[in-house]
Image (cartoon, rainbow, N blue to C red):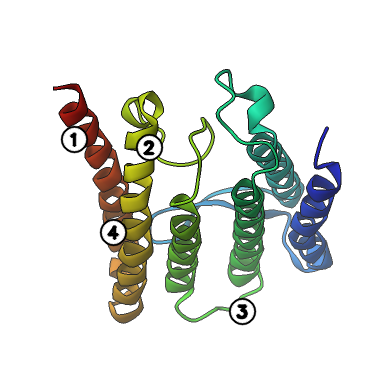
Amino acid sequence: MKHSKTLLLQWLITFIPVIYYLSLWNLLPEEVPTHYDFNLRPDDFHSKGFMLGVLIFMGLIVVGSSAMILNGNSIDSKRKAEQDNPIMKITSWVVTIFITVIMLMIVLMTKNYCIKQPIESFEKIIFIALCLFFICLGFLMKNVQPNYFFGVRTPWTLASDDVWKKTHLIGSKVWVWGNLILATIILIIPNNYSSAIFISGILLLTAIPVYYSYRLYSKGTN
């Protein structure tokens, strides 16, 4: 498979949280939190071995996601994805770093709960980190060529290269500035409102380019 060295390096990076988790092994109880509610309170528990498996599985997701992004042209039936597209390679690294950060957050949340080393405003840190990830995707979005694996993939953008291009130019601005505003709001509001504001904001920022693509395509077909 092409890009095997890149995929191997990315998987090794995602193994860092696994090593960190193993370093805490003897300090953790037999059961650790494996699921949290919207207020980041644990509401389900499994063995610490199960959590280790979850972290390793997430590392494998990185390899699978990157392989699809980097080799999209060999999977895409219309072969729209460009061979060795630098934007897609950058995207694969953004996804790798994002999932690695999520894995580190999971380990920190486990440590935070089990070892009683609380991290102040941990909820805000998570949501702001997610906003920064979406800002990075926003910057990349404007240069992404039509494909079936990354971008605003609606029936209308996939049916028209012009709709794809215009939607992603607008979507890029919406995601960059929208998530910047969202991160700022989350930073200044009380912790207990963070999850509701984040979810509402992301749904709105996702809906805008989707609706815009529909409007563009409708005008073109009338």
Q: Secondary structure at mark 3?
A: loop
- Residue 97 position (above or below residue 167): below
Report the front residue among 53 and 202: 202
Q: CA distance from mark 4 to mark 3?
A: 26 Å
Q: CA distance from mark 1 to mark 3?
A: 50 Å
**Is label 2 in contact with label 3 (beta carbons under 8 Å)?**
no
**Sequence order check: which comes first, mark 2 or mark 1?**
2
Characterize the local packing of mark 1: few (<14), some (14-19) or many (20 or more) Cα atoms within 10 angstroms.
some
Q: CA distance from mark 2 to mark 3?
A: 47 Å
Residue placed under numbered mark 4 in the picture: 196
Please tell me in which quadrant of the rendered image residue 72 appears: top right
Residue placed under numbered mark 1 in the picture: 215
List the single residue furthest toward the left. 222
Residue 183: percent from left, percent from top:
36, 71
Q: Amino acid at mark 1?
A: Arg
Picture residue at 49% right of the left edge, 50% below the top: 143
| Badge nearest the viewer, 4 or 1 | 1
Residue placed under numbered mark 2 in the picture: 164
Residue 156: percent from left, percent from top:
31, 28
| Badge nearest the viewer, 2 or 4 | 2
Residue placed under numbered mark 3 in the picture: 117
Picture residue at 72% right of the left edge, 41% below the top: 57
Q: Amino acid at mark 3?
A: Gln
For this view, does 214 lie left or right of residue 187? left
**Is label 1 in contact with label 3 (beta carbons under 8 Å)?**
no
| Badge nearest the viewer, 1 or 3 | 1
Picture residue at 20% right of the left edge, 28% below the top: 220
